[in-house]
Image (cartoon, rainbow, N blue to C red):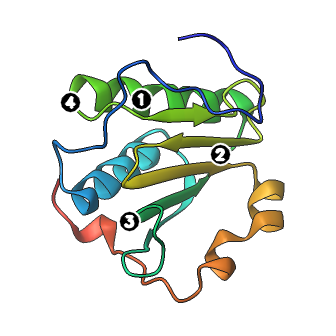
Amino acid sequence: MSKTHDNSIEQPKTGRPAAELDSKELAIKLAKLAHDRHCEQIVVLDLRGLSPITDFFVVCTGTSDRQMRTTGEEMMVECKRDGDPPYGHSGLDSASWVLIDFVNVVVHIFTPEHRAYYDLELLWGDAPRIEWTQEES
């Protein structure tokens, strides 16, 4: 894969939708990975029936550029290894907003400032929150 600018989405040559895991299971797995990498304020939003684009958002806050980049990279590596490679990603170089698109699940890793500015939880206020800490992966 080649490097991209922050505003572009990098896509593999053989992208495919996440199919190995159910989309809810994948969202929970990604939330747990974010937690294991010490991300904060992790929220899983259920967008099924609300968005034609994806089933779930995983939204979290990173505490440093390095942590955000490493978390995003580790999510992509682990999911690819498990048969659910990302379709695309953006922001790994800027680390103010890392976006990873697994088609049925989209991960957003924000700095505190960018999370407050974009406020996805308010924008998708009708979306139920998934209690991912209670789920088994």
Give the residue number, with chain letter if any, for mark 1. 76
Give the residue number, with chain letter if any, for mark 2. 62
Which type of secondary structure does the marked residue at label 4 adopt? loop
Quick check: 112 left or right of 58?
right
- Residue 12: x and y in percent read 45, 21
Give the answer, above or below, for where 12 lies relative to 24: above
- For the residues labelled 4 and 2, the Cα–Cα distance comes to 26 Å
Q: Earlier in the sequence, mark 2 or mark 3?
A: 3
- For the residues labelled 2 and 3, the Cα–Cα distance comes to 23 Å
Q: Residue at x 48, y 43 (%)?
A: 101
In this rendering, the label closer to the viewer, 4 or 1 = 4
Give the answer, above or below, for where 111 lies relative to 24: above
Give the answer, above or below, for where 47 lies relative to 97: below
Which type of secondary structure does the marked residue at label 1 adopt? helix
Q: Earlier in the sequence, mark 4 or mark 2?
A: 2
- For the residues labelled 1 and 3, the Cα–Cα distance comes to 18 Å
- For the residues labelled 1 and 2, the Cα–Cα distance comes to 16 Å
Give the residue number, with chain letter if any, for mark 3. 55
Q: Residues within 10 Å of mark 1 (few under 14, many from 20)?
A: many
The three-letter code of the residue at mark 3 reads: Asp
In this rendering, the label closer to the viewer, 2 or 3 = 3
Q: Earlier in the sequence, mark 4 or mark 3?
A: 3
Q: Earlier in the sequence, mark 1 or mark 3?
A: 3
- Residue 31: x and y in percent read 40, 53
